[in-house]
Amino acid sequence: MKKLIAILFLSLTCLSCNKDEDDIPNSIAEDLQEVIENNGVHALQYCCVGCSCGQPHGWGADYSFPGDNFVRIRDENYNLLRLVQYDVQTVTMNNVSEKRLFLYFP
């Protein structure tokens, strides 16, 4: 009987130690989606660190987060585990403004 109680106690202890999904830290993609939502971002822009980057208005408006910390901007996929930094900027061309999330990669 004592063995049964000990096994039951150990089993319950082990089950209560399992992580809930709420305890798992957010992925980079989830964090960026929150930044996009909180800042009203219209488009994403890929940039490399130390070089110039540019794109016309609306170019990066076709984006998604397909999973596994990747972002798709138009036809290209980028690994967010390689992301160095990001920045939200308002870009104005021909009196038209667009909020962009600039993603900097090496």
Image (cartoon, grey):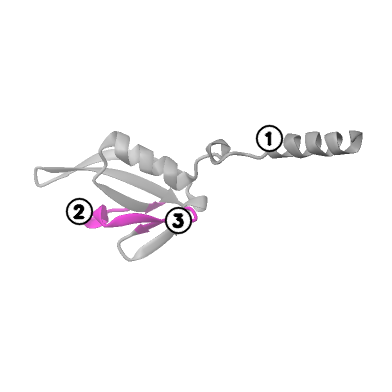
N-term-proximal mark, 2 vs 3: 2
Q: Amino acid at mark 3?
A: Gly
Viewer-proximal residue among 104 and 80:
80
Where 59 sits versus 75, above or below? above
User: Which numbered disc covers residue 67?
Assistant: 3
Left or right: 88 as drawn, with respect to 12: left
N-term-proximal mark, 1 vs 2: 1
Secondary structure state at the residue bearing disc 3 = strand
Q: Is 53 a magenta residue?
A: yes
Left or right: 54 as drawn, with respect to 50: left
Name the residue tied to disc 2: 58
Q: Which x, y percent locates residue 88?
A: 32, 39
Q: Amino acid at mark 2?
A: Gly
Q: Which x, y percent locates residue 7?
A: 83, 39
Q: Estimate the spatial distance between the alpha carbons at disc 2 and disc 3, rounded to whole Å.
A: 23 Å
Q: Residue at x 37, y 52 (%)?
A: 47
Instruction: Indicate which label's residue lies in the foreground, 1 or 3.
Output: 1
Viewer-proximal residue among 16 and 50:
16
Q: Which x, y percent locates residue 10?
A: 80, 36
Residue 93 in view in this figure:
yes
Residue 52 in view in this figure:
no
Instruction: Give the residues in magenta.
Output: 47-72
Name the residue tied to disc 1: 16
**Callout 3 environment at 10 Å: few (<14), some (14 to 19), or many (20+)?**
few
Q: Residue at x 49, y 56 (%)?
A: 68
Left or right: 75 as drawn, with respect to 90: right
